[in-house]
């Protein structure tokens, strides 16, 4: 882990709190994400992981707290603005353009970097830079064999890969991935883990994940949340050994024998 | 259907329509001219409903605003200049759509439908109840605009055949214009917004601006249709802005098959033709019309635009979906 600790901090969230009426979904959550690092948000259902990732991506404004991206305060930015500065995300429930082909979906994502909406007489399919970038990102996400398929008919795992390809096409420096392995078979899951490791080389990844094997296979840092609160944050070895984590969470989870 | 067959079909249809003035029957020339105007109107709405996913139930407002604009901007006893009054009328509709769009595009779903309707009703009452519009009798356009360019007159809109071809050329231009735009990065983004607006935002698209662009453009083209309508018939009434008209044009788009420009044209033809035929048969023609629309929605989910594909699949013995 020592190799990654010296890295540049990409995303820094300080004391994020989110209330829904009287319910406190997140209280004083601080997370930091460095380049070349996979940081996993762990916690039982209802712990507030999705709320946290929604605040980071701009889908949900925090009630309190600040978020910085590469030193700049981005707390007030919308989801679209955060995408433009370099934060990309995928969703827990697959969120794609079902009628579009894989190529068109990712091309549209690439187009978001140079939108030029006033050029209404140019043809989108003649923008070669966007097409080339789309093909490269599809390849990087491991979906090269499905370029011309309609997104809606892809397998669940492939749709998750498509989401990653779309995020990559936006040049995101930070990837916020909400359960990218959910509902995947073991084979799909293993290939996604490889994709994640490859992506880590140049970016920072924040992951919400339940699959324990995968978590310990990829995580550089783990933050454990329980009931909307931060329980513990540290490298995988520390989390595994933590008494507090075992009491609060792992004691009830049989799958945690690694 | 492959692209070539589709193109041939469209050209044949265009040639048939272009032959209508050969009949020499004013009745048919005027009715088909009106249908062509409604086809422009339906295409402009399809840009919103079928391509951007915005179900506007107040599109008649932009039709009516430009129609009134030409009547109000023209001098009482002489002809206005077409090349001034056309862009002016269309711009007024575009401006209205831009301003109204700033408000209505902040809402979604059923609220969007209701708010577009509310704004259209406001426009209706402005022309119906203020001195501006001349009340429920509407206003006459005594002289059709003159196409004169520094004394040279390429065509004469008071000639019914010239008027017909002017409308036909406008309709073809609008079709080509929209078809082109839909292939541009702007158009692809609109279709992306229809498919999944939330995803577009998280990919970094400021979707509000795209929707406002589409709404303004649709208002402008709806205005072009209203302009042509006013010039064709020589008078305007507040009924042009009524919610019945907004509903009719929506039905044309649904009949034709949403998200298909040629479908919108076919929908306008089918709707107006049914109106004529059924009204000839019975004064309860709206009952017949309603029945046909229910049948189309139930049995032809893709509208008329889906029919050639169905025929082809049936002939090939394939499964009809």
Image (spheres, coloured by chain):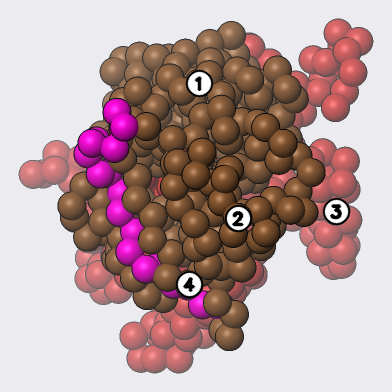
Chain colours: A brown, B red
Q: Chain of mark 2?
A: A
**Chain of the residue where label 4 is placed in the rendered structure:** A
| Rendered view: B73 above or below B91 | below
Relative to A252, residue A201 above or below: above
> Which quadrant, please, contains the C terminus of chain A?
top right
Residue at 37% across, 75% down: A64
Q: Nearer the viewer, residue B39 or A79?
A: A79
Do badges 2 and 3 share one subunit? Answer: no
Is the same chain shared between marks 3 and 4?
no
The circle drawn on residue A195 is 1
Magenta residues, dominant SS class: strand
Of the image marks 2 and 4, the number of the one nearer the N terminus: 4
Tell us which disc is closer to us: 3 or 4.
4
Question: Is label 2 or label 4 in front?
Answer: 2
Q: Position of residue A142 (x, y in %)?
A: 53, 15
Other residues around mark 2 within 10 Å, as few (<14) / some (14–19) / many (≥20): few
How far from the left and from the top, in percent, is residue A175? 41, 38
- According to the picture, the residue beneath numbered tag 2 turns out to be A243
Quarter of the image for residue B112 reads bottom right
Residue on which the image places disc 4: A27
3D distance between C-alphas at marks 3 and 4: 53 Å
Callout 2 and callout 1 share a chain: yes
On-image quarter of the N terminus of chain A: top left
Label 2, label 3: how far apart the Cα atoms are? 66 Å
- Specify start and end residues of the magenta stretch as a single range: A2-20
Residues beneath discs 2 and 4 located on the same chain: yes
Near mark 4 (Cα within 10 A), the count class, few <14, some 14-19 or many ≥20, is: many
Q: Is residue A135 visible to us here?
A: yes
């Amino acid at each position: 882990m020592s190799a990654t600790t010296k890295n540049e901090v990409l995303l820094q969230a300080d004391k994020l709190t989110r209330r829904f009426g009287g319910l406190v979904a997140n209280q004083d959550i601080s997370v930091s994400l460095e380049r070349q690092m996979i940081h996993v948000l762990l916690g039982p259902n209802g712990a507030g992981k999705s709320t946290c990732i929604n605040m980071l991506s701009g889908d949900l404004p925090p009630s309190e707290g600040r978020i910085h991206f590469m030193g700049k305060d981005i707390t007030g930015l919308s989801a679209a603005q955060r995408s433009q500065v370099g934060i990309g995300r995928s969703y827990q429930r697959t969120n794609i353009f079902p009628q579009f082909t894989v190529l068109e979906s990712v091309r549209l994502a690439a187009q978001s970097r140079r939108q030029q909406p006033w050029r209404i007489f140019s043809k989108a399919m003649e923008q070669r830079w966007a097409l080339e970038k789309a093909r490269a990102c599809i390849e990087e996400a491991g979906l090269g064999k499905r370029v011309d398929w309609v997104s809606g008919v892809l397998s669940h795992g492939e749709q998750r890969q498509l989401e990653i390809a779309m995020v990559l096409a936006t040049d995101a420096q930070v990837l916020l991935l909400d359960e990218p392995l959910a509902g995947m078979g073991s084979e799909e899951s293993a290939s996604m883990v490889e994709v994640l490791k490859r992506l880590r080389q140049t970016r920072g990844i924040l992951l919400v994940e339940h699959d324990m094997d995968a978590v310990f296979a990829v995580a550089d840092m783990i933050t454990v949340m329980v009931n909307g609160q931060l329980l513990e944050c540290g490298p995988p070895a520390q989390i595994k050994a933590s008494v507090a984590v075992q009491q609060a969470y792992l004691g009830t989870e049989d799958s945690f024998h690694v | 259907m492959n692209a070539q067959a589709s193109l041939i079909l469209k050209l044949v249809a265009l040639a048939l329509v272009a032959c209508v003035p050969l009949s020499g029957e004013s009745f048919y020339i005027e009715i088909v001219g009106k249908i062509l105007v409604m086809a422009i109107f339906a295409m402009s709405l399809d840009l919103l409903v079928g391509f951007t996913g915005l179900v506007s139930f107040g599109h008649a407002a932009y039709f009516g605003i430009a129609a009134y604009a030409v009547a109000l901007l023209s001098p009482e006893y002489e002809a206005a200049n077409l090349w001034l009054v056309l862009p002016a009328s269309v711009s007024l509709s575009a401006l209205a759509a831009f301003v109204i769009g700033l408000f209505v595009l902040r809402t979604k779903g059923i609220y969007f439908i209701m708010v577009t309707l509310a704004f259209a009703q406001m426009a209706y009452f402005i022309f119906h109840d203020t001195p501006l519009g001349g009340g429920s009798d509407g206003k006459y356009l005594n002289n059709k605009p003159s196409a004169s360019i520094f004394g040279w007159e390429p065509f004469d809109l008071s000639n019914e055949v010239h008027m017909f071809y002017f409308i036909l050329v406008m309709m073809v231009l609008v079709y080509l214009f929209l078809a082109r735009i839909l292939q541009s990065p702007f158009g692809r983004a609109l279709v992306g917004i229809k498919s999944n607006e939330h995803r577009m935002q998280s990919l970094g698209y400021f979707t509000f601006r795209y929707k406002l662009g589409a709404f303004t453009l649709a208002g402008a083209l709806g205005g072009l249709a209203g302009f042509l309508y006013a010039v064709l018939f020589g008078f305007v009434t507040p009924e042009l802005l009524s919610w019945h008209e907004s509903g009719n044009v929506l039905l044309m788009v649904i009949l034709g098959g949403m998200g298909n420009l040629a479908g919108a044209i076919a929908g306008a033809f089918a709707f107006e033709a049914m109106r004529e035929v059924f009204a000839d048969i019975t004064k309860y023609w709206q009952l017949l019309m309603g029945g046909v629309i229910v049948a189309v929605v139930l049995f032809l989910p893709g509208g008329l635009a889906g029919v050639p594909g169905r025929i082809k699949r049936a002939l090939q013995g394939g499964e009809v979906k």
